[in-house]
Amino acid sequence: MFIKYRNGTRLQGILVALGDQLIRVAIKDADDAAIFRLVSGVWVSEDCEVVTFEFAEDGFPPQDVTDFREAVFPKPARSAAIEPVM
């Protein structure tokens, strides 16, 4: 999902929880989840900024593959990560 602020800021996140008038979103590259509240028919951030949400039913356009980092283990491991004790 995307969170859009009125000043043009657009953040990418994952919906963590949805309540009666509350939504919690894990924001990409943020340490803590953000909470948004429904106030008088509009969604408001923790900083009292009006936001809108964009959800994709069929996914978002693919990103450039150069935007992804190399895998931690690019090749399959040849031995077990943990050796048996007995």
Image (cartoon, rainbow, N blue to C red):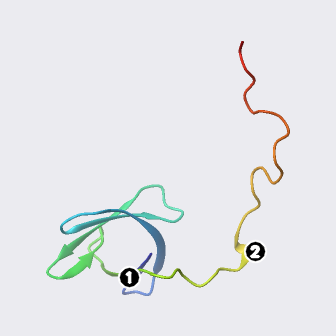
Mark 2 vs mark 1: give the one in front.
2
Which mark, by number, is residue 66?
2
- Helix, strand or loop at label 1? It is strand
Q: Secondary structure at mark 2?
A: helix
In the drawing, what numbered circle is on residue 5?
1
Measured as percent of width and height from the top left, residue 20 is found at 18, 66
Q: Position of residue 30 (x, y in %)?
A: 49, 61
Q: Determine the residue located farthest toward the front in the rendered image.
A: 86
Q: Residue furthest top?
A: 86
Q: Does residue 15 sit above or below 38 in this rendering?
A: above
Amino acid identity at mark 2: Thr
The quarter of the picture where the N terminus appears is bottom left
Give me the residue at 81% from left, 54% from top.
74
Residue at (72%, 28%) from the top-left corner? 82
* Most distant residue in the left direction: 40
Quarter location, residue 3: bottom left
Q: Which residue is pictured at 73% across the width and 20% down the height?
A: 84
| Residue at (19, 69) in percent of width and height | 21
Looking at the image, residue 29 sits to the left or right of residue 82; the answer is left
The x and y percentages for residue 68 are: 70, 68
